[in-house]
Image (cartoon, helix red, strand yellow):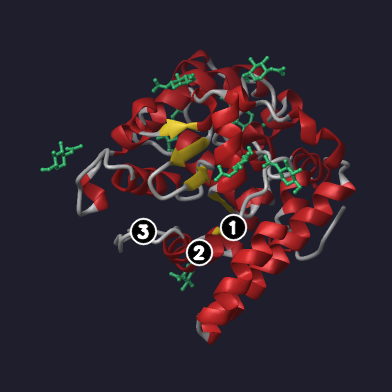
Amino acid sequence: MFVLKVILGHFVVSLSFGVKIAWLEQIARQEVLLKGCTANFYEKNKQNLNITSLDHILVDKKHKLIYCYVPKVGCTNWKRVFMVLTDKSNATNLWDIPANIAHANSSTLKISNLPKLEALSYLNNFTSFLMVRHPFERLLSAFRNKLEDQSESAKYFQTRIGRYIVKKYRPNATSDEIKSGKNITFREFAQYLIREGVTNELANEHWMPVNDLCQPCLINYTFIGKYEWFEEDTRTVLDMVGAPYIDFPVSKPNYTRDKLRFYFQQLSLSEIEDLYNLYKLDFKLFGYDLNPILGFEIG
Ligand SMILES: *[C@@H]1O[C@H](CO)[C@@H](O)[C@H](O)[C@H]1NC(C)=O
Ligand SMILES: *[C@@H]1O[C@H](CO)[C@@H](O)[C@H](O)[C@H]1NC(C)=O
Ligand SMILES: *[C@@H]1O[C@H](CO)[C@@H](O)[C@H](O)[C@H]1NC(C)=O
Ligand SMILES: *[C@@H]1O[C@H](CO)[C@@H](O)[C@H](O)[C@H]1NC(C)=O
Ligand SMILES: *[C@@H]1O[C@H](CO)[C@@H](O)[C@H](O)[C@H]1NC(C)=O
Ligand SMILES: *[C@@H]1O[C@H](CO)[C@@H](O)[C@H](O)[C@H]1NC(C)=O
Ligand SMILES: *[C@@H]1O[C@H](CO)[C@@H](O)[C@H](O)[C@H]1NC(C)=O
Ligand SMILES: *[C@@H]1O[C@H](CO)[C@@H](O)[C@H](O)[C@H]1NC(C)=O
């Protein structure tokens, strides 16, 4: 974590007490990550970074900034910021950039689109970051937003994945239920994930583990941001690269322990363990545990 120490030295000397605390927190996050990576023998795979698979890593050459976007962790807004930083948009209010434009492939340059040597040089030299969140909170957010929601935008997921889940995981499903693909229960969704996995080709980015999307053990991210610290961490990243002030809209949903427990109590303990195992690396690498769901830890 040499890169971090250099940057850290710079910031500790020049910044205020509050920022020092933030950097101490950052060192702790980096240590947890390094420990998790080592424990999982990731070191030996360091040679095997596959650039063409890094299609979630965005590049801003102007500010020498790299961002691995993780769906359900504020990524739409960060993509909007990238459009502003890279002059793809002149918007002064981020909300003026429609979400579908922010998500369009052509709106931001991805590492996976670059020749290998160029990609490696950016990965080695640019400030890089990702934003993470409690794995089960992220999973629940994806479920509520993409499958449970009765809005138009959820329809895409309901017709593609919802119908499939009802058909396969609801033994007494009526043909109307299968046709709509709505009203999937969290338990049906969990059973689908447990049976069919979260990392294969067909797995969806909204619930694919961060480890698979961002390769945090192969790429030396300068900064690990957390959803719980979203505003502070966003400000820190923008400051690090000398970005202009950007008013970052934050609409943090209110995930209380009660809501997590409401959904997870539909599952048996062994189903929770199975789900935990699917996201085990995300739990370990980013320092999360099952306390918010169970009131105690497993694994
Ligand atoms: C690299 O990733 C791409 C895209 O995911 C995949 O098609 C290709 O087979 C991978 N290459 C290797 C050597 O694994
Ligand atoms: C932003 O504004 C500049 C100057 O008015 C203009 O040249 C440029 O095309 C605009 N960029 C976009 C993406 O609209
Ligand atoms: C963006 O590109 C990826 C892979 O290159 C492709 O799978 C996806 O469908 C594209 N998305 C859009 C909205 O074009
Ligand atoms: C960036 O990283 C590459 C290795 O990929 C290295 O050769 C190069 O010297 C580094 N520095 C700059 C300024 O490009
Ligand atoms: C990450 O850091 C290690 C050790 O300094 C280095 O060997 C490796 O090439 C770096 N990885 C990337 C993608 O820059
Ligand atoms: C299917 O079974 C579940 C649980 O056993 C029950 O709650 C539900 O009402 C049943 N649905 C139909 C259409 O019979
Ligand atoms: C889904 O649930 C809602 C509210 O509980 C109900 O009104 C609707 O009929 C259900 N739809 C289907 C297809 O089961
Ligand atoms: C979150 O919701 C709970 C109850 O649903 C409420 O007690 C709490 O004040 C809310 N917190 C925030 C920050 O809105």
Mark 3 or 1 closer to N-term? 1
The residue that label 1 is drawn on is 223
Q: Secondary structure at mark 2?
A: helix
> In this view of the protein, can residue 204 be seen by the observer?
no
Instruction: Look at 72% across and 23% down and name the residue there.
Output: 196
Label 2 with label 1: CB-CB less than 8 Å: yes
Q: Which mark is residue 243?
A: 3
The residue that label 2 is drawn on is 233
* Ligand 5 under 8 Å from disc 1 Cβ: no
Marks 3/1: CA–CA distance: 16 Å
The type of residue carrying mark 2 is Asp
Instruction: Look at 35% across and 49% down and name the residue there.
Output: 81
Q: Position of residue 230 (x, y in %)?
A: 48, 62
Q: Quadrant of residue 53?
A: top right
Q: Secondary structure at mark 1?
A: strand
Q: Position of residue 133 (x, y in %)?
A: 59, 54
Viewer-nearest of discs 2 and 3: 3
* Ligand 2 under 8 Å from disc 3 Cβ: no
Q: Secondary structure at mark 3?
A: loop
Label 2: few (<14), some or many (≥20) within 10 Å?
A: many
The type of residue carrying mark 1 is Phe
Number of dots carrying numbers: 3
Label 3 with label 1: CB-CB less than 8 Å: no
Q: Position of residue 214 (x, y in %)?
A: 62, 39
Q: Position of residue 271 (x, y in %)?
A: 78, 40
In this orientation, which residue lies closer to the viewer: 95 or 136? 95
Q: Which mark is residue 120?
A: none
Marks 2/3: CA–CA distance: 14 Å
Label 3: few (<14), some or many (≥20) within 10 Å?
A: some
The type of residue carrying mark 3 is Ala
